């Protein structure tokens, strides 16, 4: 059963590396360039995929496998994906605001 879980979730590390690198690029020094990077949309749904895989396998004797650890791991992986999406969205918003504020001319009123 463990083998099936890791086969099912085997694409997650590559996805995570790609999406985390994208989020990291949103924290570059040039907010204009960083603002052009779109927010991430990452829905790996490890929990749903595991649920589907587990039900495909069919019933197992109670002593054969504890289903709780894979469920917890899948849930944690989905939480990492959601957190990465939120970080990316916040970084994009900061970059857009910062790039926009740098593009506005500054007018100082020296008449007083």
Image: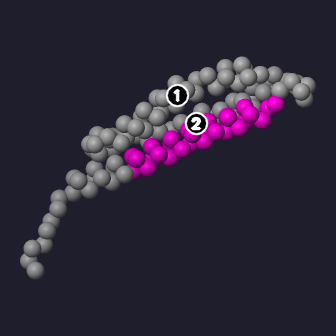
- Give the residue displayed 46% in from the left and 35% down from the top: 20
Q: What stretch is highlighted in magenta?
A: 66-93
Query: Where in the figure is residue 65, as x and y percent of width and height?
Result: 83, 26
Say which quarter of the image contains residue 9: top right
Q: What element carries label 2?
A: loop
Depth order, front residue of 80/36: 80
Q: Is residue 75 left or right of residue 62?
A: left
Predominant secondary structure, magenta span: helix
- Give the residue displayed 79% in from the left and 32% down from the top: 67
Q: Mark 2 points at which residue?
A: 43
Q: In the image, is residue 54 above or below residue 38?
A: above
Q: In this view, does 64 lie to the left or right of 96?
A: right
What mark, if any, has residue 15 been given in the picture?
A: 1
Q: In the image, is residue 46 above or below residue 91?
A: above
Depth order, front residue of 79/108: 79
Query: Where in the figure is residue 48, as x and y percent of width and height?
Result: 70, 34
> Could you classify mark 2 by the number of other residues whose Cα lies within 10 Å: few (under 14), some (14-19), or many (20 or more)?
few
What mark, if any, has residue 40 been given in the picture?
A: none
Query: Where in the figure is residue 25, as x and y percent of width and height?
Result: 37, 36
* Viewer-side label of 2, 1: 1
Which colour assignment does the render follow? one colour
Q: Distance between the residues labelled 2 and 1?
A: 10 Å
Magenta region includes residue 25: no
Sequence-earlier tag: 2 or 1:
1
């Amino acid at each position: 059963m463990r083998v099936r879980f890791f086969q099912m979730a085997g694409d997650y590390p590559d996805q995570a590396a790609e999406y985390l690198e994208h989020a990291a690029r949103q924290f570059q020094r040039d907010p204009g360039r960083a603002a052009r990077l779109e927010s991430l949309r990452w829905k790996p749904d490890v929990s749903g995929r595991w649920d589907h895989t587990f039900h495909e396998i069919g019933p197992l004797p109670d002593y054969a496998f504890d289903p709780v650890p894979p469920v917890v791991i899948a849930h944690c992986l989905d939480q990492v994906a959601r957190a990465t999406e939120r970080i990316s969205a916040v970084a994009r918003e900061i970059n857009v605001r910062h790039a926009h504020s740098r593009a506005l001319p500054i007018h100082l009123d020296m008449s007083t």
